[in-house]
Amino acid sequence: MVKKMLEKQFTKIDNLKNHIGTEVTLAGWLYRNRPSGKVQFLILRDGSGLCQCVIESGKISEALFEAVKSLGQEASLTITGIVREEPRSPGGHELAVTSVKIIGESKDYPITPKEHGVDFLMKNRHLHLRSQLEWCIGKIRHTIINSVRTFFNDNGFTLVDTPIFTTIAGEGEQTLFEVDYFGRTLHLAQTGQLYLESAAMSYGKAYCFGPTFRAEKSKTRRHLTEFWMVEPEVAYIDLHGLLELGENFVSFVVEQVLKNNRTQLEEIGADIAALEKIKPPFNRLTYTEAVDILTSKAAADFLANQLESFKSEKAAIINKIAALEAENANAKKQWQINKIAADINELKNQADELDVKIENNPKHAQLAANFKWGKDLGGSDETIISLMHEKPVFVTHYPKAAKAFYMKTDRTNDNVVENFDLLAPQGFGEIIGGSVREDDYDMLVHRVKEEGYAPESYSWYLDLRKYGTVPHGGFGLGIERTVAWITGSKHIRQCIAFPRMMDKVEI
RNA sequence: UCCCCGAUAGCUCAAUCGGUAGAGCGAGCGGCUGUUAACCGCUAGGUCGUAGGUUCAAAUCCUACUCGGGGAGCCA
């Protein structure tokens, strides 16, 4: 009831285009205030967008005018005024203010319009969510999750929620979180797959979507200990069918983001032209072909060229810094000097980042050149392959020894399994891992034993091969990695509201 | 777990050869009727991450620890 009243009472900023020339009331928070004597420019943030509100002296009481002038960043207020078009306002509309009501004060809001470090922002994550970049990424994440559900719901899949407390591991038990469950040690799920296979034998097509947990002590820009994953599983499907499903699915998600979040993509500077190329079919490589590429002269040349362009990029930055320093010596106004100093600082950061790349490039080249068939592809190997392609790349048929026991052995080549990874382009790396599942009872038991597990603890999973086994398979897509790729985010931690990392669980 | 880098004002950073700290932003006060990280003037704000060591003298050099960043391994 209350909600209904509020929605009637207040206009949303993203709906102002329908109210030009009329008086509306906005409810939100003060994003920025620029007082200028007898006029004030307030930027109001209401969760749907930003709007400039202009208060002229005399239009409201002198006392209120002064009170608004001294409001801190993020103070909450409602503003009433006449809507008009104004290209200089973010969003294109402006409010000529007729009255203001202060709801809540805000003193010394920690996140200022200036730059901040990662550590500081993470310690203020609960407030940082209000910032524009975080807001845009959150909006895009929402569309991604919504379109994931839409895609599977509209293609005959049934949602099945798999348990979080589990007694068996999907792959390699050492990386799971342990939980005390009435005195028994259980693990937090790192995949719903094994359960989902049972569901696929009931519904034909099923998917699960939820949080998943990995206790790996990874400290990289691509890892979280708690992340969201969607996993479809299909009965009567082969590897080709899975690849088609995967490319149609990913293309649909990207298409929906382009359709619904254009302004946010522009705002955060995402590579829209690159996203528009994401359409089926994607590239397909076997693992063996990928290894050939890694060890080829083409890859060596590619990396050598990359190194050269890093170096010339760095030289250009060094020149720019020198030019700015010269300019600074001639600058007269203090604010000019400060601005130039800030630019120099930014360029120095870019140069530092390039130094890391220049340092890593030969190591990665070395790893790639010496790659031996049989090893799993490393992060840098995936990056190289994905950088060498414009569209996403499927890599299929990995060595059996490097992969999980449940993957189906290729009947034409005993050394490989019918699996695939999907590498996002431009160096983002793996966003999907999937496989056809071993559907032969005896071969699966053999693989369980080969990996050193006890077949008894997989009895219900093995049952699926006893009672009407069928060829089947599926995959898992990491939501945060997908958000990072689509938004062009450097780090996965800004792709979820409250990231969980090795040493970061406080907020 | 291993390798590299870092920690100075609320925030982002500076401090030459070892000589006990300085800018901007933010905050406070004042000025400005079309601003866009506005601008101009003034004010306050520091046990230089912690603990030792070297030295006449340490933010600066050495050792250990804590915290953070990047990468490797592993993965979505």
Image (cartoon, coloured by chain):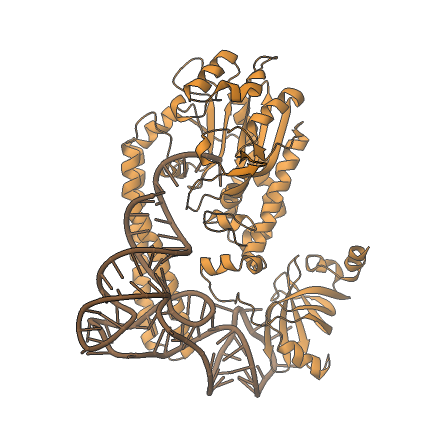
Chain colours: A orange, B brown
Quadrant in the rendering for residue A78: bottom right
Quadrant in the rendering for residue A340: bottom left
Residue A46: x %, y % from top left: 67, 61
Q: Give the residue drawn at x 51%, y 51%.
A: A505
Instruction: Return the residue found at the far front.
Output: A183
Residue A172 is at least partly visible in this image:
yes
Q: Is A388 on the left or on the right of A122, as rendered?
A: left
Q: Is residue A49 above or below residue A239?
A: below
Residue A244: x %, y % from top left: 54, 26
Residue A21 is at least partly visible in this image:
no
Q: Give the residue drawn at x 54%, y 57%.
A: A125
Q: Give the residue drawn at x 31%, y 67%.
A: A323
Q: Which residue is at the front of the view, A226 or A269?
A: A226
Q: Is residue A37 above or below residue A134?
A: below
Q: Is A249 on the left or on the right of A171, as rendered?
A: right
Q: Give the residue drawn at x 38%, y 23%.
A: A401
Quadrant in the rendering for residue A83: bottom right
Label total for image: 0
Q: Is residue A386 above or below residue A240?
A: below
Residue A79: x %, y % from top left: 71, 69
Q: Quadrant of the C terminus of chain A?
A: bottom right
Q: Is residue A144 above or below residue A21?
A: above
Residue A203: x %, y % from top left: 67, 23
Q: Quadrant of the N terminus of chain A?
A: bottom right
